[in-house]
Image: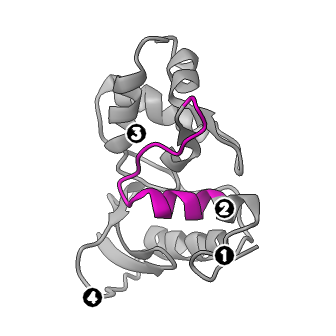
Amino acid sequence: MTCTIATPIGLLYACTDGVAITALDWHGGSLHVMSNHPLLLQLERELGEYFTCKRRNFTLPLAPQGSAFAQVAWRVLQEIPYGETISYKTQAALMGRPSALRACANANGRNPIMILIPCHRVIAHDGSLGGYSGGVQIKRFLLELEAGAAKSLSVGC
């Protein structure tokens, strides 16, 4: 089951297998398709709360599909507290693979459940933002939103 969800950063495509959220990513179209599936309705509600600074943690079950390495990388992402960042170097070290910086960045880039698996919280070791599938301006917006200072897209906490 799928739907599109309108957010301050654009339309997002969401998917569930009926048990967990399996995808949340950019939607290329302009159609806002609703769903009455309880998990997708809960996802839309929780994202709305996140973007209005009323939610810091998501409660939905997640089932991202990826390699064993990617699964570990995504688990580390889920441990980064709201409003905080770590470097790719730190992520690799937390995975027990300190030389796997590029592999971490690649796994983050393949993250199928954006925001809920917060790859936007990983930045370069020098403090620069690094990349993001939605563009650096969206990554900056999400980090500023979590820091309580999001102004770039008319949303702030």
User: How busy is the neighbourhood of tag 3: few (under 14 within 10 Å), some, or many (20 plus)?
Assistant: many
Residue position marked by numbered label 1 in the rendering: 151
Residue position marked by numbered label 2 in the rendering: 144
Q: Could you say where residue 143 lies in the image, as x and y percent from the top left?
A: 62, 56
Q: Could you say where residue 149 lies in the image, as x and y percent from the top left?
A: 73, 67
Q: Which of marks 3 and 4 is nearer the N terminus?
A: 4
Q: Give me the C-alpha separation between circle 1 and circle 4.
A: 26 Å
Q: Which of marks 1 and 4 is nearer the N terminus?
A: 4
Can you tell which of label 3 and label 2 is closer to the viewer?
Answer: 2
What residue range appears in magenta?
125-143
Can you tell which of label 1 and label 4 is closer to the viewer?
Answer: 1
Question: Which SS class for mark 2?
Answer: helix
Residue position marked by numbered label 3 in the rendering: 108
Q: Give me the C-alpha separation between circle 3 and circle 4.
A: 27 Å
> Residue drawn at (50%, 20%), measured in percent from left and top?
92
Q: In which quarter of the image is the N terminus?
A: bottom left
Question: Nearest the camera: 109 or 123?
Answer: 123
Q: Give me the C-alpha separation between circle 2 and circle 1.
A: 8 Å
Type of the residue with mark 2: Glu
Answer with the quarter of the image where residue 102 lies: top left
Q: Give me the C-alpha separation between circle 2 and circle 4.
A: 28 Å
Are circles 2 and 1 on residues that touch, CB within 8 Å?
Answer: yes
Q: Earlier in the sequence, mark 2 or mark 1?
A: 2
Question: Which SS class for mark 4?
Answer: loop
